Image: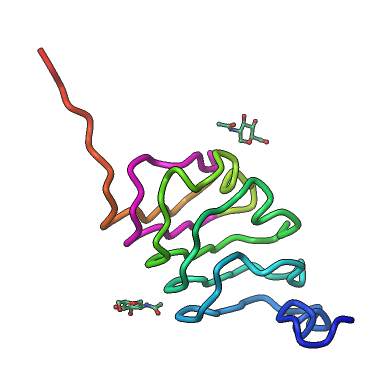
Amino acid sequence: MCVKMFSCLLKGLVGLNLLDVSGNLFSAVPRHLPPSVQQLYLSNNSFSGLHEGSFEGFHNLKYLRLSHCGLQSEGIHPQAFNHSSLVELDLSYNQLTTIPTVPTTLQYLYLEANKIRGDVITH
Ligand SMILES: *[C@@H]1O[C@H](CO)[C@@H](O)[C@H](O)[C@H]1NC(C)=O
Ligand SMILES: *[C@@H]1O[C@H](CO)[C@@H](O)[C@H](O)[C@H]1NC(C)=O
């Protein structure tokens, strides 16, 4: 039965372009969103991790915001963000120690307020 699930409620919105669910209690990326979604705002939720298929099927996803989500590098699959449609990725205010793999076509990447170390030059 497809009644109360979040993704079921949105299923009929075939023209949905922007979905902002910032500041909620999501623990995983919602599944089966309308494929028309181009802007997905998930900031201020709490994700334990992101797997390879977390954004699978979002063929039009261009703007993805995941700031303040408690993300750690270990919990992010290397291919989680490697989707060619992405233009902007906001990963600020997380616990990242490394920079994740992103598509070469990405135009905006926000990584402020994480735990990434710069290169140390030794002589
Ligand atoms: C997320 O939470 C931070 C800290 O509480 C707040 O400054 C920020 O405005 C919030 N952002 C969103 C998109 O909800
Ligand atoms: C990212 O995806 C592209 C296209 O599918 C692929 O060619 C590339 O090897 C991937 N990058 C990494 C680091 O795996």
- Residue 20 locus on image (x, y percent): 55, 79
- Magenta span dominant secondary structure: loop
Residue 110 lies in the magenta stretch: no
Q: Is residue 69 above or below residue 57?
A: below
Does residue 73 appear left or right of residue 113 in this picture? right
Q: Which quarter of the image is occupied by the C terminus?
A: top left
- Residue 79 locus on image (x, y percent): 59, 41
- Residue 10 locus on image (x, y percent): 75, 82
| The residue stretch that appears in magenta | 87-104
Which of 90/77 is in front? Answer: 77
Which of 36/1 is in front? Answer: 1
Does residue 95 appear left or right of residue 26 in this picture? left
- Residue 47 locus on image (x, y percent): 50, 63
Residue furthest to the right in view is 1
- Choose top left, top right, bottom left or bottom right for residue 7: bottom right
Residue furthest to the top in view is 123
